[in-house]
Image: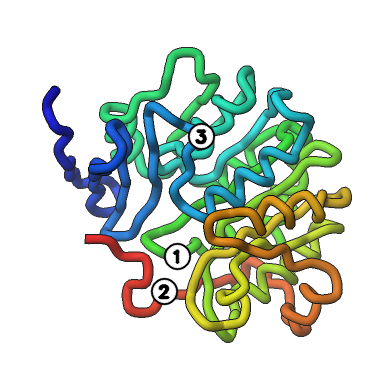
Amino acid sequence: MDEPIPVTRDVDWGTAKLMPDVDRARAWLLTVNGAPQSYVDLDEPTHLEFEYAQRVAHVLDTAAEPGRPLDVLHLGGGALTLPRYLAATRPGSRQRVVEADRGLIALVGEHLPLPEGAGIEVLAADAREALEASPAASADVVVADVFGGSRVPAHLTSVEYAHAAARVLRPGGRYAANLADGAPFTFLRAQVATFSAAFAHVCLIAEAPMLRGRRFGNAVLVASHTELPLDVLARRAAGDAFPARVEHGAALARFTGGAAAVHDAEAVPSPEPPGGSFSVG
């Protein structure tokens, strides 16, 4: 069998690369403009290489009893890591994936095709526009993993956007977003305040050193109108290869520190990672 070789292609928002993993036969890392976007193992879709993906998977795993199909809206597609995971763990799920980069959709479709009958529809559109066009109470989970380069776009950080996500979720549904920030956490604190203005329950899942301000990193924000399974999420996050904790309640309020919710008029992208924190080759 021929050894897989890297693929480089110009896409709508820059240069995408698919790089094979030498340790796993049909596994690939996707980068865009040097920033890691996705990791996919075509033979083992439940293998999640990135820590943030594992944390979002905990949210998906606890959204309903094991194996029950879910209706999920994914904002941001990349190489479709989490949609593939959910199709494997909850067969029969109906998933819509919104990805703005048509060139990236074509690249992934050509080199990392979805299995037959995966139940995954990929739509080329802006995430906010697709969210606002989605029917009310149509999703059990909304997953947001949208980065322009290494930054979350400003129009996906506001109270208006959070209310749009809340409208699309069913009663008891959950929103989970991959965010990135570092001390003094101006962006992340504002995001907690923003989603607290639209949802009754909010928590953050992240590694303790990141939350203490020791390094720039990812945090998964989870929001719902109903109580979250905090104990289960905490146990799962603590058991990861890179253990994380679940910040909620009074501790999360202290972290937020009186930050104000952000509206469309003053929304800004997440900060640029210092020194190319997330860059690869």
SS type, badge 1: loop
Q: Residue at x 47, y 30 (%)?
A: 122
Position in image of residue 228 (x %, y %): 82, 51
Which quadrant would residue 21 be assigned to in this image? top left
Q: Residue at x 45, y 57 (%)?
A: 147
Residue 188 at least partly seen: yes
Q: Is residue 232 above or below residue 160?
A: above
Q: Amino acid at mark 2?
A: Glu
Q: Is residue 107 left or right of residue 219?
A: left
Residue for badge 1: 151
Q: Residues within 10 Å of mark 1 (few under 14, many from 20)?
A: some
Q: Marks 3 and 1, Cα distance to the nearest angstrom?
A: 26 Å
Residue for badge 2: 272
Callout 1–callout 2 Cβ contact below 8 Å: yes
Quadrant location, the C terminus: bottom left
Which quadrant would residue 124 be assigned to in this image? top left
Callout 3–callout 1 Cβ contact below 8 Å: no
Residue for badge 3: 46
Q: Amino acid at mark 3?
A: Thr
- Nearer to us of marks 3 and 2 is 3
Position in image of residue 275 (x %, y %): 33, 78
Q: Is residue 63 left or right of residue 142?
A: right
Q: Marks 3 and 2, Cα distance to the nearest angstrom?
A: 30 Å
* Camera-nearest residue between 50 and 125: 50
